[in-house]
Amino acid sequence: MEEFACRSIGRRAMMLRFIRISLTILLFQVLFVGYTVTAQTSSSSGIQRHAEGYCAMYDICGARSDNKVLNCPFGSPSVKPSELLSSKIQSLCPTITGNVCCTETQFDTLRAQVQQAIPFLVGCPACLRNFLNLFCELTCSPNQSQFINVTSISKVKNNSTVGGIDYFITDTFGEVLYESCKDVKFGTMNTKAIDFIGAGAKNFGEWYAFIGRRAPPAVPGSPYAINFRPTAPESSGMKPMNVSTYSCGDTSLGCSCGDCPSASVCSSSAPPPAQTEGSCSVRIGSLKVKCIEVAVTILYVVLVSVFLGWGFLHKKGEETPVSRAKPLISGISATGNGVIRQSSRQKDENIPMQMLEDGPQISSGVQLSIVQGYMSKFYRKYGTWVARNPILVLCSSLFIVLVLCLGLFRFKVETRPEKLWVGHGSRAAEEKLFFDSHLAPFYRIEQLIIGTISDADTGKSPPIVTEDNLKLLFDIQKKIDAIQANYSGSMVSLPDICMKPLGTECATQSILQYFKMDSSNFGAYGGIEHVEYCFQHYTSTESCLSAFKAPLDPSTALGGFSGNNYSEASAFIVTYPVNNAIDKEGNYSKKAVAWEKAFIQLVKDEILPMVQAKNLTLAYSSESSVEEELKRESTADAITILISYLVMFAYISLTLGDTPRFSSCYISSKVLLGLSGVILVMLSVLGSVGFFSAVGVKSTLIIMEVIPFLVLAVGVDNMCILVNAVKRQPMELPLEGRVSNALVEVGPSITLASLSEVLAFAVGSFIPMPACRVFSMFAALAVLLDFLLQVTAFVALICFDFLRAEDNRIDCFPCIKVSGSNADPEKGNQLRKPGLLVRYMKDVHAPILSLWGVKLVVICVFAAFALASIALCTRIEPGLEQQIVLPRDSYLQGYFNNISEYLRIGPPLYFVVKNYNFSSESRQTNQLCSISQCDSDSLLNEIARASLVPESSYIAKPAASWLDDFLVWISPEAFGCCRKFTNSSFCPPDDQPPCCSPSSGSCSPNGVCKDCTTCFRHSDLANGRPTTEQFREKLPWFLNALPSNDCAKGGNGAYTTNVEIEGYEDGIIKASAFRTYHTPLNKQVDYVNSMRAAREFSSRVSDSLKMEIFPYAVFYMFFEQYLSIWRTALINLAIAIGAVFIVCLVITCSFWTSAIILLVLTMIVLDLMGVMAILKIQLNAVSVVNLVMAVGIAVEFCVHITHAFLVSSGDRNQRMKEALTTMGASVFSGITLTKLVGVIVLCFSRTEVFVVYYFQMYLALVLLGFLHGLVFLPVLLSIFGPPSRCVLVEKQEDRPSTSSHF
């Protein structure tokens, strides 16, 4: 996929092909080569005189069978050349003056061969000069015999020709030559020129060995052996050649910093050393810990010490006898101007909120805040009205929700990844749009990865490159070539949609390209031996070139190898690049999608069995695979989710009923009420979806899968609290009184919890990622509708259900009435018998938490959890692994695993320059380029410098530069490139039509292009740079020029889509791109860090050059969110918790109470993040939504207990026990157990994202909420709780009775 060499395919193609020309440098020996023996030379062919002014070889005496010419072994004095020949030699070889040892034909051969290498080296004048001197001295030096010794002579047509020579040359020359050339870039291929003209030599000795190797027939290279020697025998009178050399940092012939990073001018801008990312750490003995871990440990020790000291003193003070004041009186100090409601307390009562009939003169009351007072009055009147008009309330509320559901007719689901995960106004999205519209959309990727199975004992995988496997690959390719996809009645095949850099053949990246994708060439080319030969000579040998005329880098078609050991590769990687379009809904894109679907189906049905039959593995993918698999995911867990809902429904029905008794269970059960509550939850979800669909907001699959579960989990506790509150009321009261009292008792806390949840979910709408923003919007409205339905429709349903039970009608069949003997035996009692959970909370749970030692342990343990979680949070990594999002049985699971295992190169990276001013008045050309005379801190030099520290920059190679290649292409030194006819029209290189007939197979020196001249002389250019007019005129020539042997720098194919020339006439190029590659990226954090590094780099360079530059890679759009995911998470959590705090403060008017709720919520969220770090759950938009949602759900665990504590009377311990007795059972059964049974079912999900982000996180949330809400919070309240709102009030005799407090 990403390993595939981006748009360089085109350039690569022709480029590398001509690069074999580089190998022809070996052919430069040809220059000194042969000649047909003439009568006058044959007589002296065996004579050698090693003295100044003598030649060792002169003229051409013959040719090999492959037409490579051979020199004559002629030891004659050097010859004075003609004035024309002398000027020609001086233009190429300025070190040679006076007599020469070459004929004009030899020099022309030298010049023709050198012209193929010049484009690779012309950007570094010092390297080029040293390189030319090597061959100029060998071919034409007047003192040739002093350092050339003919060691063997061959006969060609009875003429003596040179068969081998010794070339005596100093090591100093070789070292300087290699040092000046070793870092010179060949931008087109994002690599170094030495890889092509020196076979990747690591020192000058290896380079000499490469040049001097005698080439077999029809293979580029020297026609005879050249043995480079550093010293000559003393008796021979010879001395090594040691002509002047130039370092790449030379002041007169200096190279750019990109080609010569060791130059002194570049030392000041050397790349920073690679920095290993990590936080501050401290070593304690052999243990290395982070500073934050040490800090929280110290903080914990200090806090615990202070707390334990205070606890000891406090306990000791309590043991001292003191007079006790009445608890009720102590609450008076907390009173204000709020409303006071009366209530009487009875000994041993289960619930403090009871209706008080005529009582004593002095009774307890609750002083409410202004808001609570108004809410109490509202709920009292509203409860009475609902109980009297249940049908009206039920019908009107359902009518409103059903009206909202009408919006479902406009329901649409968004499945496009770029619309789900990329926010509006995203910088990466805008940059992608700019790149696609001004340059070209990045191509689509279709890929196969065929690998061998590792040995069970050694763990190593056997090589994939075998004859049987190659034949299998041919069979697979034949099937793929035969794919015919149907699109709107027309048949689509691979050639119809594939990427064709040079307009002929598909640029398929496959090892079969070494056989031109033709199975008939397998045997003819030599089979496996040919493949292994091409691994080393893919850039230079004609037979190794691909069908699309480009060299194929083995690293793009093989995987699972180390270094350059391609023969040990354990996988074939076959990539089909397909042209892309900006309009994803257009016909072209749909044609590609149709072919991709046929491709995937073929692989599943036919190719996979073929590969498995050979005991190999197969991974595969298409551009549209992820989207298609995400669509399939929507149905993958439908059964799991349905079972989860059914389990929750069954539990709700059980928990809403009274304690089961066989004799009356069919009356006391509340299955119908539970089912009605679940239906109301579903209606709230449908109403939310309907509303947003009506206003044009598309839904997502996550909404349909998660929100019903979420709203059910959030809403069930309110249902339990409402039902239990009604059941707690005295039975002698009429139903409307019980309902009214119940709403007064729990209504404010339900409202507080629900508003907090709505605000917490609504905060998620600030998340820029569309999928999560839409989820938060839908969830907030669904929770709000669910709350409104609970206090309207569900209260009405409660009235109906209690009337049914009191009338002895059977649950689920209310039309059937049973005899009075089966009525509830406790009907006449004032209070129902407390349930098991209530008795547990009162008799077990609360007393244990009241123990002073238990309190100290609880506070210390929970504080430790919170502080440890703070330290653990630093270990959470941003990202969302693609494997997690997909179904477990998706074929892409294996594909993504193989990608990280086999690929050896990262995704393409472009640095895009906006509004490049190429006019003569601007310096921007030198600020961008990286050849000679360019600024040392230019963009391309900085990229090359960054590639030297890939660990921190994530840049693997120097950039391919159309600007560098263009400047080289038009330079007079590259005399085979930019040429013109006498009429000033473009003249192609000699090896291209019309100079060379495409049908003849060879080029005639007398072709129609013999009158072509170079575009410019040195005097035509201003400091080596074209004028505005020259740039404007020649740029289209360059972009249309095909690369070939005679000029490898043509821009057609390689740079066609890297430059936008539309509107460039005014001297401004609106968009241009320079391509490089990221290092291999295996983990999500690598993608995030690489994007961050690229942006930081481009920002720094942009500021330095005062130009607008941005980085672009195809994955940036999806990973941009992670650059600021921590900031997004913290801001949203802060707003959510802050919103809850404000709501609590407004409703309770108690800063103390609100602060305690804030503390507990913060601890729950911190502990949840600590669990995320332990379970290695990554931070992404899904987990951020879950964290924000955790705030809303955690409110349920805190608000009800805290509110009950606030309005209870007695000391803090008594109030804590009373709060647990009153609300603990409802919180445990309605919140904890309900969520728990629903969450556990999710562990059986087929999709990993449900298991990780919903089962694991929700389970952790439920358990943490339970522990904090029913263990830590009661203990905290019993020690530091706010004063009671209960006060002593005097009841007037004639005042009517009032109801109890909450």
Image (spheres, rainbow, N blue to C red):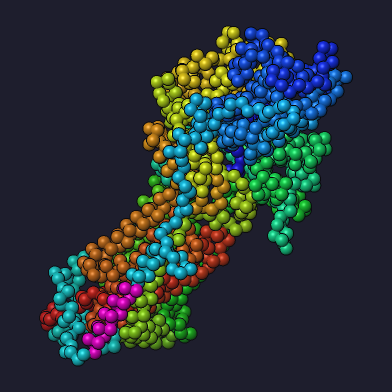
Residue 310 is inside the magenta segment: yes
The C terminus sits in image quarter = bottom left
Closest to the observer, 1233 or 169: 169
Comparing 1278 with 12, the one in front is 12
* Dominant secondary structure, magenta: helix
Residue 401 percent coordinates (x, y)? 38, 56
Residue appearing at x 30%, y 62% in the figure:
1140
Question: From this viewpoint, which residue is outermost toward the front?
Answer: 235
Which of 1254 and 1110 lies nearest the eye of the viewer? 1110
Image quadrant of residue 679? bottom left
Rendering coords of residue 168 (x, y %) = 70, 30
Is residue 612 found left or right of 911 in the rendered image? right
Residue range in magenta is 301-319
* Left or right, residue 647 beside residue 1012: left
Q: Position of 1145 compared to 804: left or right?
A: left
Identify the residue at image location x=42%, y=41%: 427
Compared to 454, does 970 lie above or below? above
Front-most of residues 167 and 534: 167
Residue 1207 in percent (x, y) is at 24, 76
Residue located at (64% from left, 14% from top): 98
Q: Residue furthest bottom?
A: 321
Image coordinates for residue 1149, horizontal then vertical, percent: 21, 67
